[in-house]
Image: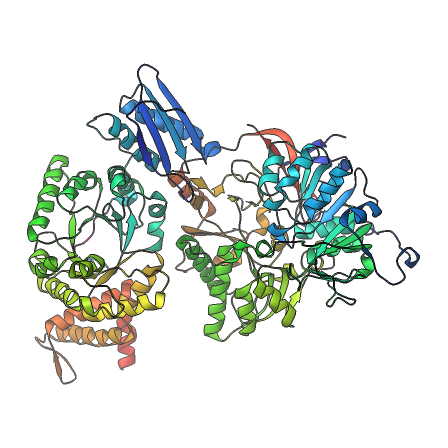
Amino acid sequence: MEFVSDKIAAIGNKGKGIRSDCFITMELTEGEGIQLELVSKVQSMFGEDIRNLIFQILDFFEVKNARILVEDSGALSLVLAARLEAAIKVLKPVDKDFLLPLIPENLYNTASDRNRFSRLYLPGNTPSLSINAGIHKPDGIILDLEDAVAPSKKYEARFLVRNSLRGIDFYGAERMVRINQVPQGLEDLEFVVPHNVNLILLPKCESADQVNQVNSRIAAIKAKTRDSQPIWIMPIIESALGVLKAFEIALSENVVAMAIGLEDYTADLGTRRTQDGNESFFARSMVVNACKAAGIQAIDSVFSDVADMEALKQNVIRSKALGFDGMGCIHPRQIKVIHDNFAPDHDEIEKAKKIVNAFIIATEKGLGVVSLGTKMIDPPVVKRAQKVIDLAVTMNKLKSDWREEFLSEVK
Amino acid sequence: MSKYDKLTTNAVGRTVPQVVNGKDATPFLGVGKFRPTGRKFAPRISTLADYPEDGNKVVPGLKEALIRSGLSDGMVISTHHHFRNGDLVAIQIFDIAAELGIKGLTWVPSASFECHAPLIKYLEDGTIHHIEGSMNGALGRFTSEGGMQGLGILRSHGGRYQAIQDGDVQIDIAVIAAPTADPFGNATGDRGPAACGLLGFALADSQYADKVIVVTDNLVPFPCVPWQIHGNYVDFVVVLDKIGIPEKIISGTTEITKSPDRLLLAEMTAQFCDEAGIIRDGFSFQAGAGGTALSIGIYFAEMCRQRGMKARFARGGSNKYLVKMLEEGLVDYILDGQTFDLEGVRSMRENPGHLNTSPFTSYNYHGKGNFAQFVDVVILGATEVDVNFNANVVTHSDGYLLHGIGGWMNCLLSKCVILPVPLFRDRMPVILDDVTTICGPGELIDVIVTERGIAINPLRTDLIEKMKGSNLPIKTIQQLKAEAEKICGKPSKPRVTDEVVAVIKWVDGTVIDSVFRIDK
């Protein structure tokens, strides 16, 4: 198909190694009707479906005359729709959105203090990676609009992220989006807030004001859509200034966790990231302390060597020892290592069992003080022990009726 | 001669011809239902008087060997596929045939590869009438579009042995490329520049063909030891500069998968085997070549290591991972059917626990038993599976014939057959109402593992019972199909005509399904 005008939309991805995506080239014409050429890997199975969807979308946006080439490598409908909508909106201003149904499986909110051991980064413009992300069971899935999307692809990525939030089943993972830095990131919010996002990651955050700007924009969008589901914020500290402002950021409204991004941070310091991590010890500790002081979760940076699981494990053990509650991952295989090593270990569970048991006995007896042997146990220690037990049960490391066995052992 | 005749419906409801390339063919009757009668095919009796007194059978070139073998119109020519995509011999045979103006040949490879695509020109000009074996990639596409003069016939590795043994296929000239050979014709695959491990796929050819030509690029003085192929079967020996491309002989499909989705499938499959009680001291398993199958082997090895157990034998293709298991004492024997990398070749040469097998010992259905039938668990791939557990390995969902059967069909007779497959590939659901082509009847396929759930064949009540209370996502096959369709949409069937272009032979030689010409 030949394209002639000087205004051509070229949206999506194609070529070697591209799967589950499509590339759309489109131009508007005058009075020639719709000329559609479809080249699809799934022609025999879904050729008719694809054509129907394309005409439905063209109709919706009142496109009557256009030349369109669709090169399809097996895109799901939600991907195809996102690509075509982006192409149309590049060519003509329209003030409405083509929305496929929001799947019922995705209608869940997340608690502010839910477990956030792992959160898997997915490039926002690469559909093949998001479709199966949920089966690897990360605690959170991040559709990334920031660093993982090339500047020239940022526009189209927003449509894809929006459609993915609505249409891909993430099997219970917390649905997160990393927006671009404020102020550009505020525009991203328009594409995600009304579409069932649970948490917004705010990159390169350096002030409480930036969090407030995000909060205000979210509130404004929600007011329009009369939406009431909570949307949490996870600022990412990635600079020296951010580290020094960590506490005020952590105290901001709707912030439930705060992460540190070490690649940018070490660059800001003018140093390099090392295996030992001495260069970031201060920053990590600052972030952990700010989070704990504010009563939120502290989340560590990603570990970038996806092939070295042993080094990742050591990294997680160090991270947990510093006080972090979770870590980012850039490959699904990292999830299990992160979960296994953030999870309470055998000694922690055994200790927690004793403390919780002592607490239950004290409560039953109406005692104001919990004691274990000759030692008094403070309330925060009991609370932490209870959390360890809950976690161990959730992660199948402990049976929910553990106390029966525990009591019989004690006897 | 018409390509086929007398269409009928077989025991799995598929339309198949009862006359194929002019010969009678029996429709599939059900597993174990067809009873062969009569005696095996016998090759001609030879006499020492016709062969060199000094045992030196070397002739100057392949052309002379073919002419002296009596190459003429309508003959059946066989080759083996141990060189996989690095084969340099098959093409030369047909170059010579075309040069001599020979027409109407039947090519019987044990498998074909992308490197054989140049043969399309000989299928077009009538040098080759049709292929019996496998039609992969470009050859499959050509066949699907109706280009072949005769009807293609696809057989499994065991089915090929059966067909040759029973006389369904009568080979006039077998050309056996051999990495090392002596002038008498003794040959081995475990050494030489084109070392490929073993030559088991050529065993039937050596035993039953009228004329046998051994082609080598590494001639050694008598005796060539070990003699995987016996010189006593061989008519001529030809020495060429190069018979195969080593780096293509060692195929690229033998690396462990890095795909997180496939690793998850492998992990779920291994866990299933464990919970089903298959992984125990002294168990046996089929070792496959695909990335997922390889990864499952790694999980098996880890379980054995942790629990101080070992497997009695692994059957199938060998590679560095399996060799490591053998050398670490995690498995007693490798019963090797084809060697996938240089470590496999080395191990076969050096380790008495690494045995070379053939389709006769491992796969032949018309024998007094075979090794594959008592393997505890086999893990295989499939392009499609249907709600009746029927599976397809030869065609894709667009109707195109693109793969051979290999040993897949023969392995279905083992004790437990598991197919780990993705629920969908891109937008293509893998679990359908009906597979495009039936290669394996559902009654023999026990478990389908997908990343979103595992379906156990209702016939396997024992497995269903064992997996009660498992943490694995056990679902019905209908649930899996519905889940795939929810994500991908409901697919249309491939657009094909009612013209048959190839038939699929079951392990007993009956016709289980047909491949139809694509409607372009």
Residue A358 in the image: x percent, y percent? Answer: 17, 76
Residue shown at 44%/44% (left/top)?
B424
B405 is higher (above) or lower (below) than B188 = above
As displayed, is residue B460 above or below residue B335?
Answer: above
Left or right: residue A307 versus residue B364 is left
Front residue of B205 and B271? B205
List x then y, in percent, for residue B95. Answer: 71, 41
Quadrant assignment, res B348: bottom right
> Which segment is the magenta one?
A108-113
Q: Magenta region's main secondary structure?
A: loop
The colour scheme used to paint the residues is rainbow
Residue at the spot 40% in from the left edge and 36% down from the top edge: B489
Q: Farthest top residue?
A: A31
Quarter where residue B490 is shown: top left
Is B194 or A367 nearer to us in this picture?
B194
Percent of width and height locating residue B210: 82, 49
Residue A386 visible in the snapshot: no
Q: On the picture, is B13 further left or further right than B397?
A: right
Q: Is residue B214 magenta?
A: no
Quadrant where the N terminus of chain B sits is top right
Instruction: Pick the residue in front: A124 or B474.
Output: A124
